Image (tube, rainbow, N blue to C red):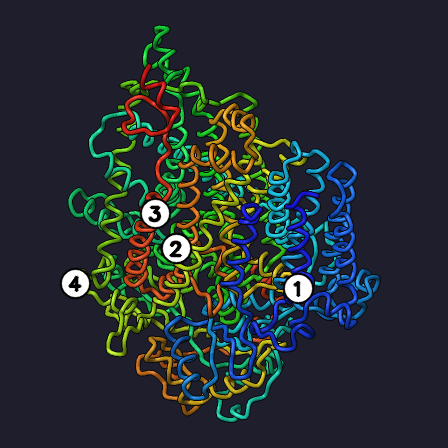
Amino acid sequence: MQKRHWLHAGLLAAAAVLTSAPANAQGSLVMYCGVQEEWCRAMSGAFEKETGIKVAMTRKSAGEVYAQVKAEASNPRGDIWWGGTGDPHLQAAEEGLTHEYESPMNKDLQDWSLSQWKAAKQRAIGIYAGALGFGFNTQQIKAKGLAEPKCWADLLDAKLKDDVQVADPNSSGTAYTLLATVVQLMGEDKGFDYLRALHKNISQYTKSGAAPAKAASLGETAVGIVFIHDAVVFAVQGDPIKPVAPCEGTGYEIGSMSIIKGARNLDNAKKFYDWALTPAAQALGAPAKSYQVPSNKSAPVPAQAPKMSEMKLINYDFVKYGSSAERVRLLTKWDKEIKALPK
Amino acid sequence: MRPATRLVLLTGWLGYVLIPWYLPEGMSLAGYPFGKSGTALALVLSGAAPWLAPIGVALVLASLLSVRQENATTGKLLAWIGFAGLVVFFAQGFAITLKDQGMPTLAALLGGAGAAQPGMGFGALVTLVSLLLLLCHGLAYRGLCRGDVFTTSSIGIVIMLIALFIFLPVSTILRSALVDQSGNLVLGEFVERFFSPTIWGLGCLGANTNCGVAWNTLILAVLTGVITTLLGLACALLILRTGMPGKRAMRLLTVLPIITPPFVIGLALILLFGRSGLFSTFLFDWFGVPRSRWIYGLPGVLLAQVLAFAPIAFLVLIGVVQGIAPSLEEASQTLGAKRWTTFRTVTWPLLRPGLANAFLLGFVESMADFGNPLVLGGNFEVLSTKIFFAVVGAAHNQGQAAVLAVVLLGFTLAAFWAQQYWLGSKSYTTVTGKGDSGLPTPLPRRITWISALVIGPWVALTAVIYIVILMGGFVKTMGRDHTPTLQHYITGFSIDFSRGLYFDGSAWPSFFTTLKLAAISAPLTALIGLLTAYLLTRQRFAGRGALEFATMLSFAIPGTVLGVAYILAFNVPPVEITGTGLILVIAFVFRNMPVGVRSGIAGLSQIDKSLDEASATLSARSFTTLWRVVLPLLRPALVAALVYSFVRSMTTVSAVIFLVSAEYNLATAYIVGRVEAGEFGLAIAYSSVLIVVMAIGISLIQLGVGERKLGRRGTPALASSAAEPIKQG
């Protein structure tokens, strides 16, 4: 008889070993982290040290966190969602997946951070900003006999045919920022004309937003359109890549933070939220090789960070371009009018 | 009633009366036997959960039967009681979940209007199994499966597992193909999405644009399936049927890709053949061949997939080639056939089930593959990546993902039926009890040459790729700065001895979790897979075909979709297991089970039923037959299932990326993070460590399971009694 039960016995044993209900007692916090691992660990470790609250941190890309939060909506597991580009945060806010909160730290924050907070109806707040631009491989550009590209228009040079990479806006927030930026900078018709011209030079629409930076640093492509801080990472490593803030002006992302609606550890989530907006917490990015600009006015700006003050930034409309209706419209149009074009 | 049934009943009472019914938060037993850690009986008596009462009634009724004789009437009653018990069990489970969810009308009917209950725990699990087994025993009493309770119970358990962990999540996700955000049925939108030109467009034929993603996937999968099958066959034939030198090294090299984490082969291919790759640079510097980006797209993905999946075909086919009875080939030669004729008319037809299975695996693997198209796809889009980005990308379109999943599922279904059609109902039995002797015929010369010509470059390429991977962990930046360094290994795997033994490398936590979960899930996968294969090939019961298809279903669903489906299905009661290690183990088991099933079926279809029948005639019960006769003959299949599930548990990305939690992070999720951050060095170093660990794991499995011993001439030191008369002869 006992032989007959080997199967369930095995399952039961496995269940006994593995099942441990998620920590629910006071003094813990479940954090979904949307930036790169090293920064995530620095944040969760520092918070643990400071408050004694045990942080269970999971790192995922912003889109993956959004998908998870949405899937778990009926029975949320996470408490705080920290980091990652602003659009999925806005989307979650729009769908009511996140919690309204007004932090006492708000008064110390940059205007762009608060405008994100307003756009999200108090459900998300800006924690860092990064401008859009491109990185070019210095060796490849030299070999082609080109002057160093400085503007969006320079990327249309016929010599760069099949030598520019950018992500697919359907899969990457970075590339969607490019789409929205170009539309705001040049107007919708001219903007799509620009993208149509650029399409001839694009060798590949990558999946991940930061991938073109890596490709440019390796010489797999001459130019990669990315957030500037993604290109800075490789430049700091000593790779032959040079980050550029385009001369015509450019858009930017606001990395955000949201409290998840129905958080089981709401008080701790609020504690983390307040703490994450302090200058000390925001200074943790640079040592972890993340060179975004922090949102607290008195947080130190990393020396390697692209200087936002020296760039021409457009007045990016996060409310309009972060709404799902406008996004779906632009993405559908891009699919039809750009992606489907022959080369 | 048989003693076995009484024991099952007792277990049921144990689950109902003694073990906490729900999963207590934090495993605390405070308030036992009432409250959150209450037992079903206590909760019913205290009026906290009246809807659990009917389950108790079912147990009482079954107990009344325990003194009755075993006959068809008892069986009928028992089966009905078990069935009714299961119905009320699931009715209350799905009707009463979280507050304001579940099925309100049904909940009110069960006396739980407006009530909520947490996820089911061990008490519920034990009771559920007991009810299921009561049903199965009852059916056996009625004479089903020759009255064998082991067989009916196994069928019952396998069906239950598949229903719960494959059908439930898959139907959850497919439902979202048909409904919009607010839950309304939108057929029109579904049709529009389904026939979209981005899926079915044929632009690549004339208009110089990209073809629809469905065609891309199909072309890639067919090519991968055919090429991997042929490579696997060539390799198996060369190793088993020729005296070729270097066989051991070749065998090792062909198995290496299977234990390589995803992304790594793709990365290595870029470092070799990319525009600035080592090989491209060499060609450019020496022969002036212009650098190009050919690797990004169909050729690159195909190359990576062939490298990655041919070993699976090899593992399936080596068992099949081993199993072909040499006596048939000898008979052919005795009748005057040349080697080539023998191969064409005897060996080849006998290989067909193996070939079909190998092709099906390669085809389905290619369709579900996510890592290689992600790294090397370029503008060549396939369904799996498209689905992933429909879920996590900027568009956040789960409905679109579900529609694409339907297309993918359709292809897999078609492949499955095509395979069935091709194999038909012919017999491929060659391992019989009847003095199966003879020496394997050497391969015809032309087959040897063709095989060697195909395998040679493949092995060479694999070797080069692994040199790149090995080196990549020890140099600063592969492809740019080749200064030797140990930095990557120190970051990931440093151990601090100053405070005792402290694993302070950043990779250790995910490493230990991965190892633990893989070690737990591999034997479970093999067990369930082979048991299912045995039931499918050896037992006749209604719904067998549906069961076989269901086992392939989880394999066909791309990992990402399965991951999201698991979250959707198992984040709420009655089965609330997200965030635990259990959900990862279950995902591993049911995703990898098809390999156990396929290799089991391939192996079993070679073993003659007369062996089972002989065992049954000698009055062995089916469990004994399975354990003493079939399983020893299935060793290659067992090895394949164990190795594959162990390895896949350690290398899967897409299925688990939504399921990992802070406490249970996995190696591959960590590696993907490193790749995203551009830290190829650490990613490659970690992958190398995983490769070594998996190699050790595989050797242990092979050592533990041992080789299959077929009574054939020239096999020295055979102790089995079946071999004796042959030696005398």
- Whether discs 3 and 1 lie on one chain: the answer is yes
Q: Chain of mark 4?
A: B
CA separation in Å, label 3 and label 1 = 38 Å
- Disc 4 designates what residue? B483
Task: Kindly indicate whether the residue at mark 1 contacts the one at mark 2 (C-beta within 8 angstroms).
Answer: no
- Whether discs 2 and 3 lie on one chain: the answer is no
Find residue B294 and report its horizontal and vertical position in percent: 34, 45
CA separation in Å, label 4 and label 1 = 55 Å
Find residue A28 and report its horizontal and vertical position in percent: 51, 80
Find residue B712 and report its horizontal and vertical position in percent: 34, 23
**Which quarter of the picture shows residue A221?**
bottom left
- Disc 2 designates what residue? A201
Q: Residue at x 60, y 54 (%)?
A: B400
Look at the image and tell me whether residue A190 can be seen: no
Q: Label 4, secondary structure: give it.
A: strand
Find residue B116 and report its horizontal and vertical position in percent: 73, 70
The foreground one among B138 and A281 is: B138
For the C terminus of chain B, the quadrant is: top left
Task: Kindly indicate whether the residue at mark 1 contacts the one at mark 4 (C-beta within 8 angstroms).
Answer: no
CA separation in Å, label 2 and label 1 = 52 Å
Q: Residue at x 76, y 70 (%)?
A: B115
Mark linked to residue B698:
3
Q: Residues within 10 Å of mark 3 (few under 14, many from 20)?
A: many
- Whether discs 3 and 4 lie on one chain: the answer is yes
Tell which residue pokes out farthest to the right in this image.
B109
Q: Residues within 10 Å of mark 4 (few under 14, many from 20)?
A: few
Residue kind at label 1, given as amino acid type? Pro
